[in-house]
């Protein structure tokens, strides 16, 4: 629970109105918050904060980001330690339950997820209602929303057991749904899950195997995707997570709330950033490659050029994105293992990063590479098409979404979300009489 600080915040007015005092609360780490819940009742005014950049919308104990230090914690554990010592289902258990699993808990949890990875056979018929060339995110939004029509036995959100069952089902079935969307776009048969494989290994097989021959999962590819899943599992109160919470605050079922998160993630400023970054690199490669990087970066510095540098900078991180360093390691490992060390896009990426880390313009603005900068290159090398990048992101982030949703419903202070506004439209006026 929040800890009441000894400090108080006082709001004073220049018109002589009496000042108003507000309590201040302290978290475990991070900035204190001013509790303004009684502001309107005491002053008749709202705060104005477009994008909620200075507003704590909830109390949470799942993820913490210190943007100035370039720090990301899952339940208190630094992301670099997590990525190097845990697999994705360890992280899923941690984010859902607050602690890393012991060996017995891990065995039970892994088995539970594995044995819920199949989806209702009728979903195959539902999927066939989409055009073959539909964007995978359009398909995934529909499939996740449709789960509530198939698994309505566990949608009583006031029942903690139902919430737990829904969490397991969503985490387990999301790789199957993403792989189904991909196979459908290719016109290939769906590949069913195989229970003797890991969570990530299963996803790789469902993506790339065909019934024509045996398929062996490449260990390097499996490790790379597992790390991508870990690095994207949760990220505090970002746009899609806030969407899940806002949607869930109305009391809707978990499948609908997660479908709303998928839809929000689809935006190019959010989950679509790694796809946009790869498109930028491919455009650069087609228009001169490494030789033209310097010229491109000069255009980026010119605000009138309209040229944007994708994959650099972050809304929260004002230092190097800690996930980017880990993703760079994975990128090098994958390209080396697959014989793609001389990949022209990776060379381009390295040159862009070098200039950004040395040029005063980018250094002063702290435009460091973010996780999207490398994850697109890794997924492309693995064989995942750019149109599917955001769906892979959604697969990983489902863990964070469902944990945040569950945390919200367990919070005695939670209320249906209802942002206010500063109205700038017409004042009261009368409809003119008809002539």
Image (spheres, grey):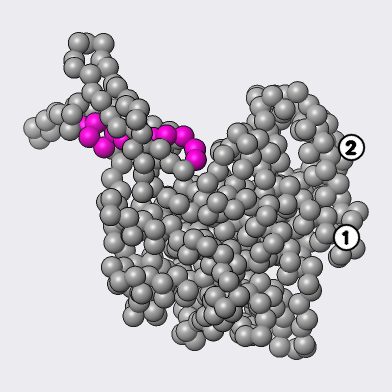
Q: Earlier in the sequence, mark 2 or mark 1?
A: 2
Q: Which residue lies under the disc numbered 1? A: 336
How much space separates mark 2 and mark 1, taking CA atoms? Answer: 24 Å
Front residue of 65 and 203: 65
Find numbered disc 1 in the image and state the secondary structure of the residue it sits on: helix
Find numbered disc 2 in the image and state the secondary structure of the residue it sits on: helix
Q: Is residue 45 above or below residue 217?
A: above
On the image, the x and y values in percent for residue 91 come to 58, 63
Nearest to viewer (mark 2 / mark 1): 1
Q: Is residue 107 left or right of residue 405?
A: right
Residue at point 69% right, 24% down?
364
For the stretch drawn in magenta, the main secondary structure is: loop
Question: Which mark identifies residue 291?
Answer: 2
Is residue 39 rendered magenta in the image?
yes
Magenta-colored span: 29-40
Question: Which mark identifies residue 434?
Answer: none
Mark 1 burial class by Cα count in 10 Å: few <14, some 14-19, many 20+: some
């Amino acid at each position: 629970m929040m800890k009441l600080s000894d400090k108080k915040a006082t709001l004073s007015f220049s018109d002589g109105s009496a000042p108003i005092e507000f309590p201040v609360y302290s978290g475990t780490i991070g900035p204190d918050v001013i509790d303004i819940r009684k502001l309107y009742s005491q002053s008749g005014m709202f705060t104005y904060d477009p994008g909620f950049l200075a507003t704590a919308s909830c109390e949470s104990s799942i993820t913490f980001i210190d943007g100035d230090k370039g720090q990301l914690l899952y339940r208190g554990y630094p992301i670099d330690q997590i990525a190097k010592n845990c697999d994705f289902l360890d992280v899923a258990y941690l984010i859902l339950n607050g602690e890393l699993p012991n060996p017995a808990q891990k065995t039970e949890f892994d088995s539970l997820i594995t044995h819920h990875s199949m989806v209702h056979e009728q979903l195959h018929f539902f999927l066939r209602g989409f055009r073959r060339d539909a964007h995978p995110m359009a398909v995934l939004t529909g499939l996740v929303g449709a789960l509530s029509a198939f698994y309505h036995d566990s949608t009583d959100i006031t029942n903690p057991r139902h919430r737990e069952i829904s969490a397991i089902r969503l985490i387990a079935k999301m790789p199957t749904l993403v792989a189904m969307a991909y196979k459908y776009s290719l016109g290939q048969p769906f590949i069913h899950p195989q229970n003797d494989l890991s969570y990530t290994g299963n996803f790789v097989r469902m993506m790339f195997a065909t019934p024509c021959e045996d398929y062996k999962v490449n260990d390097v590819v499996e490790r790379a995707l597992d790390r991508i899943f870990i690095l994207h599992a949760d990220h505090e109160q970002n746009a899609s997570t806030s969407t899940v919470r806002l949607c869930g605050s109305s009391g809707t079922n978990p499948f609908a709330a997660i479908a709303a998160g998928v839809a929000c993630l689809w935006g190019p400023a959010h989950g679509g950033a790694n796809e946009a970054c790869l498109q930028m690199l491919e455009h650069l490669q087609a228009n001169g490659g490494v030789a033209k990087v310097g010229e491109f970066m000069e255009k980026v510095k010119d605000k009138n050029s309209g040229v944007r540098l994708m994959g650099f900078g972050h809304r929260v991180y004002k230092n190097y994105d800690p996930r980017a360093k880990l993703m760079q390691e994975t990128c090098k490992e994958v390209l080396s293992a697959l014989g793609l060390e001389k990949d022209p896009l990776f060379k381009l990426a390295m040159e862009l990063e070098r200039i950004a880390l040395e040029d005063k313009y980018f250094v002063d603005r702290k435009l460091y590479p973010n996780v999207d900068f490398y994850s697109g290159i890794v997924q492309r090398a693995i064989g995942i098409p750019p149109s599917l990048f955001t769906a892979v992101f959604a697969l990983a982030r489902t863990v964070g979404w469902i944990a945040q949703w569950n945390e919200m419903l367990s919070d005695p202070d939670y209320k249906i979300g209802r942002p206010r506004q500063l109205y700038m439209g017409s004042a009261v006026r009368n409809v003119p009489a008809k002539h």
